[in-house]
Image (spheres, grey):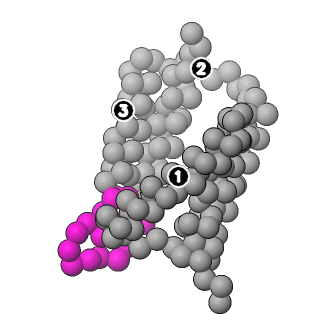
Amino acid sequence: MKDTRFPDMVTGILLMLLAAYWFYVANGMTKVEFGIGPGGYPMFVSAGLFVVGLILTLQSVIQGLPKPKGKIDRKTALRVVIFVVITFLYVRLLRPLGFVLLTPPYLFFACCFFKYRRKIVAGIASIVVTAILYIVFRMIFYVPLPVFRLF
């Protein structure tokens, strides 16, 4: 088995930083009179993500960290950078293009990027997942999602 304690520690720290940022952003979202509001669910998820990152980091440190070898797989690092850039673009384009219009292509891209070979299933799944997320957040939780604005 590969020794993954150091990468696990780095992943745990990054998860905690990302969760703290998400919690901060969600805390600044619009407050509502009834219900959890648009920031409630992201705050809950980010708190859970922070706890998971903390557990992952502590487990790695308690088990003892080996010295990093300093060898980075360039192909894997490039794939991570590409996916992070595409995700950043998705988030930036979400407000002008809208959730319903932008999410299916993003999910389809993610399936293809992670080498899921059944393209038809990936396409159908991206549409179905988008529809389910829209129904859950917009119609059940009453969370306003970004909509397409032409002008």
Q: Is 63 within the magenta?
A: no
Q: Nearer the viewer, residue 118 or 108?
A: 118
Q: Amino acid at mark 1?
A: Val
Per the model, the C-alpha gap separating discs 2 and 1 is: 45 Å
For residue 92, say whether it is visible: no
Of mark 3 and mark 1, the one earlier in the sequence is 3
Q: Nearer the viewer, residue 63 or 39?
A: 39
89, above or below 71, in the image = below
Residue at (57% x, 72% y) in the render: 98
Q: Amino acid at mark 2?
A: Lys
Q: How many marks?
A: 3
Residue at (52% x, 57% y) in the render: 130
Residue 23 screen position, x and y as percent: 38, 59
Which residues are drawn in magenta?
25-43
Residue that label 1 marks: 128
Q: Nearer the viewer, residue 141 or 131?
A: 131
Q: Nearer the viewer, mark 2 or mark 1?
A: 1
Q: Quadrant of the N terminus?
A: top right
Q: Nearer the viewer, mark 3 or mark 2?
A: 3
Mark seen at residue 55: 3
Per the model, the C-alpha gap separating discs 3 and 2 is: 21 Å
Residue 127 screen position, x and y as percent: 57, 54
